[in-house]
């Protein structure tokens, strides 16, 4: 009898300074115009809620959430190209939604490239909808790309 292989366990934990080389490497392999190592370092120093998803002692994804002035903002969410299609992006997003709710904010915002169809599909699945567009927000190979501004209302559980 053949037994199915168990999916390796993945966990989400706070991002540490020691994770930054792996996080920066994933970012560079994922985007043509990546955040720098310094930007990630500054997010940690600023006290943003920074998380990594770890699978078998390897960082497989990360996310960064800013909470201020009664609202939350997803600044970055990325899964290593080697670990995509395993629902890790959804797992990281669920963690950010949980964290935002736990701080009693009522809305969570993000910007996303309209060309990033995979991310848009995930955000829509989780109840985000577009409320605005930021013209020429992202650097692109040919000039600039607009950003879609998405929001999700959070239900505060009493």
Image (spheres, helix red, strand yellow):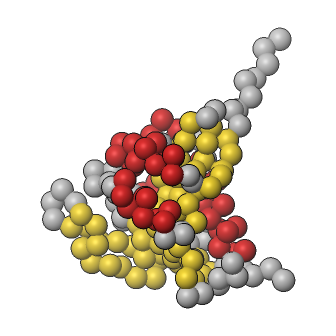
Q: Is residue 107 above or below residue 74?
A: below
Q: Is residue 27 above or below residue 72?
A: above
Percent position of residue 114, x then y:
36, 65
Q: Can you see residue 66? A: yes
Q: Can you see residue 122? A: no
Could you say which is closer to the camera, residue 62 or residue 19? 19
Could you say which is closer to the camera, residue 158 or residue 135? 158
Residue lying at 33% horizontally and 55% vertically, measured from the top left = 36
Residue lying at 61% horizontally and 35% vertically, measured from the top left = 57
Percent position of residue 60, x then y:
54, 42
- Would residue 24 appear left or right of 103 to someone viewing this image? left
Locate the N terminus and report the quarter of the image it occupies. top right
Residue lying at 34% horizontally and 46% vertically, measured from the top left = 28
Locate the C terminus and report the quarter of the image it occupies. bottom right
Percent position of residue 109, x then y:
51, 76
- Would residue 101 appear left or right of 2 to someone viewing this image? left
């Amino acid at each position: 009898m053949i037994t199915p292989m168990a999916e390796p366990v993945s966990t989400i934990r706070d991002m540490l300074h020691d994770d930054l080389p792996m996080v920066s490497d994933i970012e560079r392999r994922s985007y043509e115009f990546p955040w720098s190592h310094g930007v990630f370092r500054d997010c940690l120093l600023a006290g943003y809620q920074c998380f990594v998803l770890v699978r078998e002692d390897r960082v497989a994804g990360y996310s960064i959430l800013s909470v201020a002035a009664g609202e939350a903002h997803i600044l970055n969410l990325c899964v290593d190209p080697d670990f995509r299609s395993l629902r890790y992006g959804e797992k990281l997003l669920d963690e950010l939604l949980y964290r935002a709710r736990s701080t009693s904010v009522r809305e969570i915002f993000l910007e996303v490239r309209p060309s990033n169809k995979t991310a848009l599909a995930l955000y829509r699945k989780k109840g985000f909808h577009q409320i605005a567009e930021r013209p020429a927000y992202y650097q692109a190979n040919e000039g600039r790309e607009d950003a879609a501004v998405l929001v999700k209302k959070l239900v505060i559980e009493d």
